[in-house]
Image (spheres, rainbow, N blue to C red):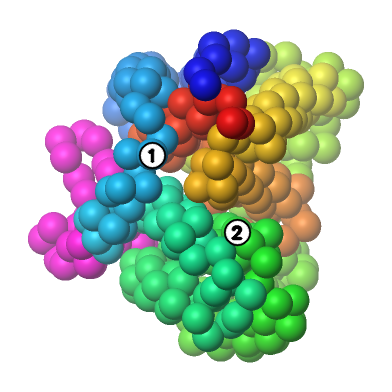
Amino acid sequence: MKRKLDIPLIITIFIICIYGIIMIYSASSLWAEYKFNDKFHYVIMQSIFFIIGIILMVIISKIPYNFYLKKSNLILFVCFILLVLVLIPGIGSVRNGSRSWFGIGGLGIQPSEFMKLGLIIFTSKYIYNNPKDMRFITKGAFPILIITMTAFLLIMLQPDFGTGTILVMTIVAMLFISGVNFSFFIKIGLVGMVGVVLLVLAAPYRVNRIVSFLNPWSDPLGTGFQAIQSLFAIGPGGLFGLGFGNSVQKHFYLPEPQTDFIFSIISEELGIIGIISVATLFLIIILRCVKISIKAPDDFAKFLSFGIIFQLAFQTLLNLAVVVGLIPVTGVTLPFFSYGGSSLVITLIEMGIILNISRYKEN
């Protein structure tokens, strides 16, 4: 049985995207003028991504969600092909030390963003088709874990630890609600802790990030620089902030503030009021999506919508935790706000899927 689209969710999505574009302009204008001699460069690019994303969201909101159930294998296969291709020199391009992008003109496409959604779709189908097997680790969780770790390793070859962490945690959360034996999560948690330690020790720059996280002032002009400048931005914000456009840290103190650390600029310019406004918008989106997931017409739709909203919530919390210095720098963007076409477009595509699910009532 069909019903109307979730209008409050649509309105909130539009508001948060426009909010993000406005703050990208404020955060990036100086850097864009210095780098491109055009202070509107980043805001124009993000506006293009926004228009593309909204068009795709509207189109996808009209595609029955069962389409993904039928095409999940193909979607996952294409995502894996893209992850392999981006690692090939001459095809994938290197930005900030990671070979994570396909460069198309002035645009950049990040295939790991597509994998996050592709794996959610495939896992939802797998759980939906094998509900009884999910109680058993070998028949239920293990095949999904193998596929997830393969994707994680390909992403780590770029390397992109932040995106890989979001992908793994999202799938683990989906397995958790599918009914997998709880002992599995204790075991995988222990293995995961050992794996993280090995990954950190394998790359000197990750060790440096841990050291700078524990004491940023041990290397204030190197590994601790971003964390210190982020806190310098958040600290003076007060209740109302320094005013829109009046950030001090965006004057080439905080590197490329329109990306991972845009929340620092929001805090500095808009203060606690800005922080509350951002939190409120995310909370509305998460609660609306949770409501849609609970009322979804079947288990595939429930798992699909849950996976999407868990990924969004976890990525948001991960970014905010980095910005305020609770965890080491991971390079994770703030959904809807951080500059980046792949992130914004994929997030809006995911919202399109959620909106389509919202059109159906449980039989």
At 38% from the left and 30% from the top, the residue drawn is 64
Three-letter amino acid code of the residue under disc 2: Met
Tell me: residue 213, above or below residue 149.
above
Q: Residues within 10 Å of mark 1 (few under 14, many from 20)?
A: few
Q: Which residue is mark 1?
A: 66
Distance (Cα) linking label 1 and label 2 = 18 Å
Three-letter amino acid code of the residue under disc 1: Asn
What is the secondary structure assignment of the residue under circle 1?
helix
Tell me: residue 325, above or below residue 294.
below
At 40% from the left and 72% from the top, the residue drawn is 147
At 73% from the left and 51% from the top, the residue drawn is 321
At 77% from the left and 68% from the top, the residue drawn is 215
Mark 1 or mark 2: name the one nearer the start of the chain: 1
Q: Which residue is mark 2?
A: 174
- Count of numbered labels shown in the rendering: 2
Q: Determine if residue 344 is in view.
A: no
Magenta region includes residue 105: yes
Magenta region includes residue 238: no
Locate residue 32: give its quadrant. Answer: top left
Between 363 and 46, the one nearer to me in the picture: 363
Q: Position of residue 61 (x, y in %)?
A: 41, 23
Q: Determine if residue 210 is in view.
A: yes
What is the secondary structure assignment of the residue under circle 2?
helix
Span highlighted in magenta in the image: 81-109
- Looking at the image, residue 175 sits to the left or right of residue 340; the answer is right
Tell me: residue 230, above or below residue 286.
below
Between 326 and 254, the one nearer to me in the picture: 326
